[in-house]
Amino acid sequence: MDFGAILPAALLALGLLGVLLTDLIGKGRQPEVPVIVALASLAAAALASLFGHRSDEIVLGVLRVDGFGVTFTVFCCVTGFFTILATMRGEAFRRPGGEFLVLILSAVLGMSLLAQAVDLVTLYLAFETVSIPSYVLVGMRRGDRKANEASMKYVLFGAVSSGIMLYGLSMIVGLSGGTSLEAVRAAVDAGAGSQPMFIAAAVMIFAGFAFKISAVPFHFWSPDVYAGAPASVGGFLAVASKAAGFAALVRVMGAMSPTVPDAADPLTTFAYAGDPLILSVTIAALLSMTIGNLAALRQTEVKRLLAWSSIAHAGYILLTLAVWSENAAAALIVYMIAYLFMNLAAFLIAGIVIREQGTGELSAFKGLASRSPWLAVAFAIVLFSLTGLPPFFGFVGKYTVFYAVFDKGYVWLGVIGLLNGAISLYYYAKIIAQMFLVEADAPETAKPMGFRFADWALCAVLVVPLLLFGILWSGVWEMAMSVASSMFGGA
């Protein structure tokens, strides 16, 4: 085994221990040291994944280190990096404590393993390694009743979905005679996929993933959790947790669904054949888009609005799995990269406004263009990008998704998706109207905003790529196609 294959995970584990030790030795007197250690470990793990190990390798029989898994490992490390920075600038406006950093690093480590797992036991353990720190992150503000309520709901929904998923996994292991995805694939090829017990197990397993990616009908936790948690934590759950869930779901569907003939990797290439798992994904995609967008229309609190928006975006991403192909795989990667910048920027700006105004209601954004024009412009760019309007990166993400859908011949799916995109414009435009067209009508919402250079710098790092990659997106697409081609046997 090449040690480089597990170097990113080792760096994250060492960073976790480093944060614990520096926080314990410093006893809180130098809170910046654990932060630096955590940021350094995340950056090192991302660089080790990006420029280190290149070959496709099975590690210890349970992890597959390939281009697909490496891409999502880098993605989750970058999200964790920006989450820590956003926490320092958001609602709390202080350096995160050692326990917060440990939880972020633990969750990112679990996400990295989840994206590369090719063994059902490892997959479930990684799944829980992501979930348990997330429960605690949501409820870390112990004096906040909303945070406590959100954490409790998150735990309860998580326990139920985890139990359902584990039961489904146990059934699959019994039917396939092994815990590896290769064994599951062999069982499907032998005809096990048509058995009623296998179908029931597949739907149960998808239920667990639907909870992780906040897809309908396992989405009920999202609005309360995102509203109760700090904005930076909400962004972390909406982006990194969702990405790892999708990466693992691709591998599981590759093992449990009909494969593409002569594919280079049958565990990440599968064809639409009307099987129950892909049918469940298609239904979840349609429901998530529609319910997420319609529910967002009624929201008056920005974090709840972004939560319902996140549910709708889960539906758009599920479309790529419903029509899986080389183009769809590349579209999934491009959309997730765009989603990283869009959602992290949205939750960052929401957190800054909440920090300054003391509330996340839409009324807090009244007259923002006159009090802080640059922040209002940045948020407008983010919202237009989330809608999918050109020339922003969000448009590129949605374009690649719908191109893959229409290219596969599923016109009706593409039309429903486009109609949902039109609906989303209304509730995003509500925030823009509050910022640019409505004057502040209360003293607390009319006061100048106390921004600092760090606020502007972090916003710029997240918002500028939405403009840059919205115009110069060919490099991102080529990278995504390179990863997709390696999965489907292309050049």
Image (cartoon, rainbow, N blue to C red):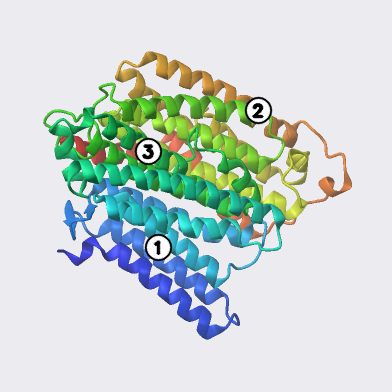
Q: Nearer the viewer, residue 314 or 144?
A: 144
Q: Label 2 sits on what residue type?
A: Leu
Q: Position of residue 174 (x, y in %)?
A: 22, 45
Mark 1 vs mark 2: give the one in front: 2
- Do residues under tags 3 and 2 come within 8 Å of each other at their CB atoms? no
How packed is label 2: few (under 14 Cα within 10 Å), some, or many (20 or more)? Answer: some
Q: Label 1 sits on what residue type?
A: Ala
Q: Earlier in the sequence, mark 1 or mark 2?
A: 1
Residue 450, image quadrant: bottom right
For mark 3, give the secondary structure.
helix
- Do residues under tags 1 and 2 come within 8 Å of each other at their CB atoms? no
Residue that lies at the very extreme toward the bottom in this rendered image:
25
Q: Residue at x 22, y 58 (%)?
A: 53
How packed is label 1: few (under 14 Cα within 10 Å), some, or many (20 or more)? Answer: many
Q: Label 3 sits on what residue type?
A: Met
- Looking at the picture, does residue 426 appear above or below residue 303? above
Q: Quadrant of the C terminus?
A: top left
Q: Earlier in the sequence, mark 3 or mark 2?
A: 3
Q: Residue at x 36, y 56 (%)?
A: 126
Q: Nearer the viewer, residue 59 or 381?
A: 59
Q: Position of residue 38 (x, y in %)?
A: 46, 68
The residue where tag 2 is placed is 297
The residue where tag 1 is placed is 43
Mark 3 vs mark 2: give the one in front: 3
For mark 1, give the secondary structure.
helix
The residue where tag 3 is placed is 204
Looking at the rendered structure, which numbered label has been put on residue 224? none
What is the spatial separation of the Cα atoms under label 3 and label 2, in whole angstroms? 31 Å
Q: Position of residue 370 (x, y in %)?
A: 77, 41
Mark 3 vs mark 1: give the one in front: 3
